[in-house]
Amino acid sequence: MHEKTKKLVIIGGGAAGFFAAIRAAELDPELDVTLLERGAEVLNKVRISGGGRCNVTHACFDPAELVHYYPRGQKELLGPFYRFSPSDTVQWFENRGVRLKTESDGRMFPVSNNSASIVGCLLSEAARLHVKVIKQQKVVKLIPPAHAHSLWQILTPDHTWQAHDLLVTTGSNPTVWQMIKNLGHEIVPPVPSLFTFNIRDNRLTDLEGIALPKARVIIPHTSFETDGPVLITHWGLSGPAILKLSAWAATALHACGYQFPVVINWVGRDPEDLTQDILAFKAENGKKLLRNVHPFELPARFWKKVLGYLRFKDDLQWANLNKSQLQDLVAQLCAATFQVNGKSTFKEEFVTAGGVHLQEINFKTFASRKVPHLYFAGEVLNIDAVTGGFNFQAAWTGAWIAATAISSQPDASPANR
Ligand SMILES: Cc1cc2nc3c(=O)[nH]c(=O)nc-3n(C[C@H](O)[C@H](O)[C@H](O)COP(=O)(O)OP(=O)(O)OC[C@H]3O[C@@H](n4cnc5c(N)ncnc54)[C@H](O)[C@@H]3O)c2cc1C
């Protein structure tokens, strides 16, 4: 077998690293593709993701809509999603024998309901295309090519790897970010995203497990506001609306040490509209007790808690609800303020906001605008999304485009540069 002349080294054996390696090797059989992974195992996050089922992508097939799920990367990902979108992801896996299915909320999983299908597919494709997957190679230093005819030097404790092109897919690893910084890139400071809110408040006690499906959550005096289900937990509040808010406000909430007020509109209704509905209900149900009937779609335990908090008597009839009681009721349902004291991890699932500054990346190629022959994909970039399969989609898209760009370059062997 003749020696391949052009070398690509990819650092990081996660979702982005494998997807890029496979794409590059497939496009250019003459490319020598080496994937360096610091751990003893590759694809660890893919394996544990989505509770072991791997939420591969999301059934949102319009790029203009898809980008709205990305608090960081929204503008930059639009063009890339037109080139490699969730439908391409579905097709890519289906072409390789892994069918995906869509759940009612749009999340897409392998039909097997087992992340092993995804891991197995990526591993066997990499092997089929002769990608060299080298484990326990923790990259500790990067030396860029000294001039146009030399190569990258990629140092691990016991080896120096050489490459014409370098693709970094190391996820959120602070030591790699420092190395990238040393190459001249700006790193947006990392902060956690996707977390739940810790709240101790009598209004939530003994209500754990209750979900309010149409809530609205607001952080007062900011523009942060989300809609959707809110779940009451032992520690405070969780559910899609809370997780979305944690992602959009990740940087601001980190800055205030996760101590902030949050206003919950439990019914997601405008206070004036709700007041009118209550008055209409009151007119027709005057003799009935508040504790027995009400015009809202609320779990019974939750409703009793609201009445107890407002100190409404058990025998209060709708006809006797006075103006100030009506106002208090509307305020509790539409604008209940809670103090958040800290955060908790959501089912061990989290992502990091922050990473390589997006202004320094060419999103047609995912190449560095600062350093020639350097590319990035996945969570190492300052890109992250809400839950639902969007984070993997960003990894697949970036990896596919970077690998396409690398493989489409003219022969990069020193003689031809
Ligand atoms: C528990 C959990 C569940 C999740 N579930 C989902 C989900 O269902 N759907 C979804 O879309 N997102 C999910 N996410 C987020 C998703 O896993 C990440 O966004 C995604 O894995 C990012 O891929 P990546 O390839 O960029 O980085 P990673 O998957 O983090 O891979 C980076 C790789 O680089 C290696 N590496 C780091 N430094 C070095 C070094 N110096 N030298 C060599 N190798 C190095 C690491 O060991 C790792 O293998 C989940 C996250 C967690 C934590």
Image: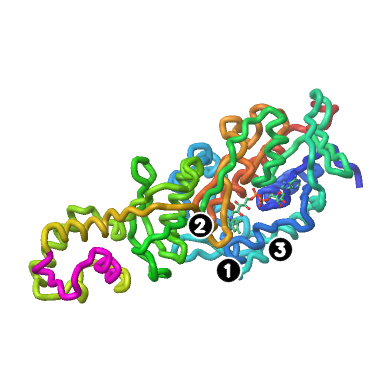
Q: Earlier in the sequence, mark 1 or mark 2?
A: 1
Q: Quadrant of residue 367?
A: top right
Left or right, 95 with respect to 259, comes to right
Pointers 1 and 3 in contact (C-beta within 8 Å): no
| In front: label 1 or label 2 | 2
Nearer to the camera, 82 or 50: 50
Crowd rating for badge 1 (residues with CA inside 10 Å; few <14, some 14–19, many 20+): some
Secondary structure at badge 1 equals loop
Residue drawn where x is 36% and y is 52% of the image = 217
Q: CA distance from mark 2 to mark 3?
A: 22 Å
The residue under label 3 is which amino acid type? Gly
Residue drawn where x is 42% and y is 70% of the image = 209
Q: Position of residue 291 (x, y in %)?
A: 21, 74
Crowd rating for badge 2 (residues with CA inside 10 Å; few <14, some 14–19, many 20+): many
Residue drawn where x is 70% and y is 57% of the image = 43
Which numbered tag is attached to residue 178?
A: none
* Residue linked to disc 3: 120
Nearer to the camera, 219 or 328: 328
Secondary structure at badge 3 equals helix
Asked if one can make out residue 34 in the rendered structure from this viewpoint, the answer is yes
Q: Is residue 362 above or below residue 269?
A: above
Taking the magenta stretch, the answer to whether it contains residue 325 is no
Q: Quadrant of residue 347?
A: bottom right
The answer to whether the residue bearing label 2 lies less than 8 angstroms from the nearest atom of ligand 1 is: yes
Q: Position of residue 405 (x, y in %)?
A: 67, 37
* Residue linked to disc 2: 388
The residue under label 2 is which amino acid type? Gly
Nearer to the camera, 255 or 376: 255
Q: Quadrant of residue 407?
A: top right
Residue extent of the magenta highlight: 303-321
Which numbered tag is attached to residue 111?
A: 1
